[in-house]
Amino acid sequence: MQGKNKILRVLSGIQPSGKLHLGNYFGMMKPAIELQATGEAFYFIANYHALTTVTDAVQLRAATRDVALDFLACGLDPARAVFFRQSDVPEVTELTWLLSTVTPMGLLERCHSYKDKTARGIPANHALFAYPVLMASDILAYQSNLVPVGRDQKQHVEVTRDIAIKFNHQFGDIFTIPEPVIRENVAVVPGIDGQKMSKSYDNHLELFGTEKDTKARVMRIVTDSTPLEAPKNPDTCNVFALYRLVATEVQTQEMAGRYRAGGFGYGDAKKALFAVLWDYLAPLRAKRQELERDMAGVEAILTAGAARARGEARRTLDAARKAMGLD
Ligand code: ADP
Ligand code: TRP
């Protein structure tokens, strides 16, 4: 089936495991939304994956709803992209099993994400270990060509490629071999402590946080101890790294100039960052509020997306079943 798609299929997923932050937005959502124009997009809410960390049903339901609103508010266009909940396509779990049979243990043992999560105290259960195979299934079920993700997910796309190549070699040409799409210039968004922004480090700036909380967190961004009068290097400053993401090119150049000139303190830089960030997010907030007033409309988008996605997954699953002798 490889090469069968003339239009490039772009696929990505996001876990409903907490409030979205700027790292998710610049690392995943924004590139994914821009790619809507490039190909046929399939975007989904990875709620099966979230079960590896979210164990409360009420919380999972609420987070799923939030991510649906967030994604649509950020510009996912249901007329262009197929948008759905992962669990509305149970075919991917069956495909996961088929793929598991060609997945070497060593391939999964090498995955950083598993090692990192268990090191942080997340129980090392089978689902957490097999997580990349479910992700491979998500990608392969829809014959995806391009997978826009943050750098931390690149290894999982590579695992997917290895699994697909092995399966195709063993059972015939069933799966398209996908490529990760990583935005190198915005690949890692720093958190307020300068480490990678992540909800698990509690160093994030929420995309739809309250004004008060967002401001307070911006004011807590870690900076060095260069005195106010001294010239400063914008390129090593966490405040500037975030500012350039939300400011225009002209504003960014002006800010860099102020840093280098000296006499400009980090407190002022943080206030400028907050102002620009809050304005940048204003249209997204407005759109989200509008969507929230029409939850039935949001549900209809997800239901229609699931029907479309399910048809695709079924076709791939049937081909894989047949190739393996399960027909
Ligand atoms: P978190 O680290 O907060 O748990 P996830 O691992 O759920 O975030 O990431 C969801 C998506 O957002 C992934 O595609 C991931 O690569 C991207 N992403 C998360 N944090 C960042 C960041 N700081 N910079 C760039 N992309 C990120
Ligand atoms: N594992 C991804 C994350 O945590 C989410 C995800 C699940 C995904 N399945 C996917 C991303 C398939 C891209 C393609 O961010």
Image (spheres, rainbow, N blue to C red):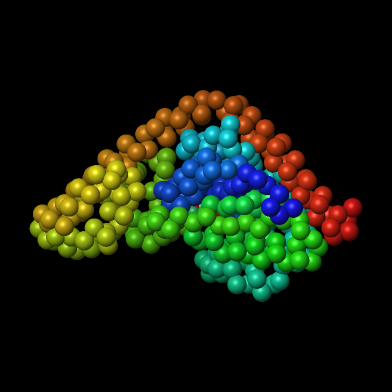
Q: Position of residue 286 (x, y in %)?
A: 42, 30
Q: What is the total number of numbered labels drawn onto the structure image? A: 0
* Rendered residue at 48%/26% (across/down): 290
Q: In the image shown, does 46 or 173 lie closer to the viewer?
A: 173
Q: Is 2 placed left or right of 258 in the picture?
A: right
- Residue 129 visible to an observer of this rendering: no
Residue at 62% across / 32% down in the picture? 301
The residue at the point 31 percent across, 50 percent down is 244
Q: Quadrant of residue 282?
A: top left
Q: Is residue 315 left or right of residue 261?
A: right
Residue 260 is situated, as x and y percent measured from the top left of the image, at 16, 57
Judge from the rendering whether residue 113 lies leftward or rightward of residue 130; answer left or right.
left
Whether 226 is drawn above or below 28: the answer is: below
Report if residue 264 is visible in the image: yes
Can you name the residue that lies furthest to the bottom here? Answer: 106
- Residue 116 position, x and y percent, is 53, 67
Residue 2 occupies which quadrant of the picture?
bottom right
**Residue at left 61%, top 47%?**
8
